[in-house]
Amino acid sequence: MLKYLLLIAFALVVWWLWRAAQARKSAPPAARPPERMVTCAHCGVNQPLSESLQVGERFYCCPAHREADEASSH
Ligand SMILES: [Zn+2]
């Protein structure tokens, strides 16, 4: 009897996992709001705010440009 209960429990887990996989497959890609673009203060390249480095009011595309700008301003 216990064997059948285990089988049913196993089938339920498999069905639940399968359903979760189907839901994930058919779900539309999460709509991301348009991200604010900022300009690197050193080279002028445009990039999303989340990928840039902010120093006060200025933005940089990479640490090297942040350091270069800081070095030239001192
Ligand atoms: Zn740059």
Image (spheres, rainbow, N blue to C red):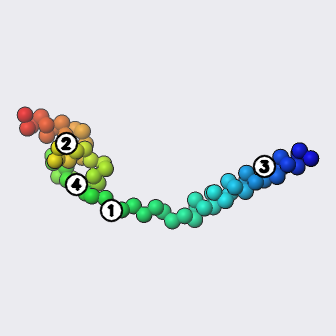
Q: Amino acid at mark 1?
A: Pro
Residue furthest right as drawn: 1
Is residue 24 found left or right of 6 in the rendered image? left
Q: Nearer the viewer, mark 2 or mark 4?
A: 2
Instruction: Answer with mark 3 or mark 2, whichever residue precedes in sequence.
Output: 3
Residue at label 4? 38
- Distance from label 2 to label 1 (Cα)? 22 Å
| Secondary structure under the numbered disc 2 in the rendered image | strand
Tell me residue 3's x, y (percent): 88, 45
Residue at label 1? 34
Instruction: Answer with mark 2 or mark 1, whichever residue precedes in sequence.
Output: 1
Residue at label 3? 10
Relative vertical location of residue 50 with respect to residue 35 in this rendering, above or below: above
Is residue 34 found left or right of 4 in the rendered image? left
Q: Residue sitting at 13 percent across and 37 percent down? A: 70
- Distance from label 1 to label 4 (Cα)? 13 Å
Residue at label 2? 55
Q: Amino acid at mark 4?
A: Val
Res. 16 image quadrant: bottom right
Q: Amino acid at mark 3?
A: Phe
Quick check: marks 2 and 4 in contact, CB under 8 Å? no
User: Which is more toward the observer, 1 or 41?
Assistant: 1
User: Which is more toward the observer, 23 or 46?
Assistant: 23
Tell me residue 65's x, y (percent): 19, 41
